[in-house]
Structure formats: structure tokens, C-alpha cells
Image: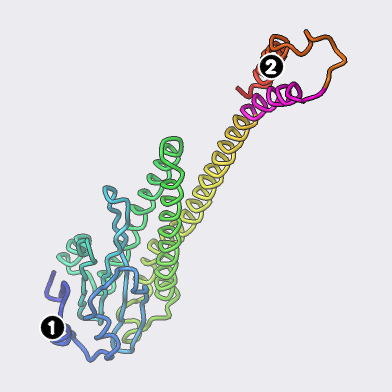
Amino acid sequence: MSARWLDLVDPTQEEVLASLPVHVDPEAVEALSARPRDGREARPVIEGHGAYAFGVLMAAHPVPEEDRIVYQEVDFVATPDFLVTVRKTPPGGAPFDPAGLHPSADEGASIGILVHRLVDEVADTYLAALDAVYGEIDELEDAIDVWTPRRVRERISELRHELLHSRKTASATRAAVRRIVDGRIEVGDHALFPPRVERLFTDAYETLVRVTEELDIARDILAGVRDHHQSKVVEGQGEVAKKLTVIASLVLVPSLIVGYYGQNFESAFDETYWSIGVSSGLILASTVVQLALFRWRRWI
């Protein structure tokens, strides 16, 4: 931190009010002091309010050992002369680390550049989350033949919901950054974001565009994994059907022979025809023929 930057972690409403450099709308104060029940509830936004800019950002923090992504909320109120950041600790995680802002703050960079560094750091977290998602999809592809179908379905569903949420959050962040790039957020006649600072946000905007495109690709890849899994399930059902057909056929023909020989009528044929040896021979011969046929068809 510096003399122009104040960083708060999980502050109370009184601490927020005591730290703000200007009068802030009650809705913004409530958002700054609200406790995160779930990091996914806040929606990224950057707004201009005349004397200050208010922003809500969500940083993506992958947790590979738990196969999940934690979203860390970091809010800010910026004036041309002062920046207040509010970091919130998500359930089961740690607050966002603003280490990337310290070098710029120590060098005496303007508040607009500090906000740019913050937005840029948040945008970069989505690249790390994207790499983690690709790794999870690769792990799922390798495990399809090992995991049970139920576990595969559950993991596909989890990844799908994670991708959808990441896409929604990244898109909202991209739209918020676009407002700065387009010069639609004015604080003190562009005192906070002069044209040269607005151009700096282009890199963060392009990063978020890339993230949203890559997330769409990841979703397509996951859909391919799902289709592959479904085809393997259908293939497995086909193999079971083949085996059941073989068993049923091996039982059906001998049953037909035994049933025919079990008829109670006077035979016009020689008694040898009705002997147990002939019937057993027919059963054995039919079984051998069926086994040879099934083997030739590669059903067994």
C-alpha cells in the first residue's frame, strides 16, 4: 500500500465508511461491506459515479487438489487522488493477493494505472483457471476407461457448470472493462482514466476476450468427451447384448431338441431315432455349430 492506496480485508460497514475518501452511495457501501456467502454471487461491474468509480471484480483461483475454482471478490472505490480496495475471503479459500499493485504504488503511479494493474491481475487469473480446466478435461479423458460411468457423468456435469459460470463471470468482467476502453466511465473530466490510461486497459480486455473464446473451446471439448463416454456406454451395452444373445441361443436350440423329443406320440421312425444318444448328439452338434458361428462373427 501507499499514501494513496488503502487495502481492506473483510471490513465492517463502519470501517468502510471511515476509509472512503468521498461520499459513496449506500448501495455501494452495502456491497463493499457485505460478507460473501458464496463467491459466485457477486457480478463483476465497473461504474462511474461522478466523483468516483466503483468496481466489483471476481478473481478466479484454481484449487487443483480439490478439483474446483474459488472465486475471490475484490471491490474498489477510486477517485483521481485515492484508491480503496476491499478484498473478501471466500468460503474455503483465501482473499485475492494484490501483489501486482505494489510495484506501481511504490513508484508513485497514478490511481488510474493502479486500477489498471488491479484489473489486469484479475484478468490474468482467468488464464490460470483456464489452464486448470484444460488439465481437468485431460484427466477426465484419461480416466473414462477407469472410472465408473456414474463418476464420469458426475465429473462431466461439474466441469460443465464450472465452465458456464467461468464464461458468465469472464464475459461480465470483459463488458465492465470495455466501458473503460470506450471512455464511458468519466471521473473528474477524465482525471481518473485519461486517454493514455484507457488504452492500457486494452490488454486486459483482449485477455478477457481470449479467455471467453477459450472457454467456448473447452466447452466444445468437454462435449466431445461426453459424446465419447456415451458411445462407450452404448458399445458396452451392445457387448452385453451379444453375450446375452449367445447364451440365449446356446440354450434355445437344445431346449427345442429336448422339447421335440419329449412329445408323447407314436413314432413312425425307427426307435434308434428317438434314442438318448441321437438327441444328445444333436444337442452337441448344434452347440458346436453355434459356437463356431459366434466365433467367426467375433461375438465371443
> At which x and y percent is residue 95?
20, 65
Q: Residue at x 54, y 46 (%)?
A: 224
Q: Total marks drawn? A: 2
Quarter of the N terminus within the rendering: bottom left
Q: What residue is pinned by disc 1?
A: 15
Q: In the image, what residue type sits under mark 2? A: Ile
Residue 61 is one of the magenta-drawn residues: no
Please provide the residue range marked out in magenta: 246-265
In percent of the image, x 77 and y 25: which residue is there? 264
User: What's the CA distance linking mark 1 and mark 2?
Assistant: 91 Å
Residue drawn at 84 percent across, 17 percent down: 267
Q: Nearer the viewer, residue 256 or 197?
A: 256
The answer to whether 166 appears left or right of 242 in the picture is left
Viewed as shown, does residue 10 lie left or right of 79?
A: left
Q: Is residue 246 left or right of residue 165?
A: right
Residue 276, compared with residue 157, is above or below; it is above
Q: 159 or 19: which is nearer to us? A: 159
Q: Amino acid at mark 1?
A: Glu
Of residues 35 and 11, the one nearer the viewer is 35
Residue identifier under label 2: 283
Q: Image height check: is 128 above or below 280? A: below
Q: Residue 24: which disc?
A: none
Tag 2 or tag 1, which sits nearer the N-term? 1
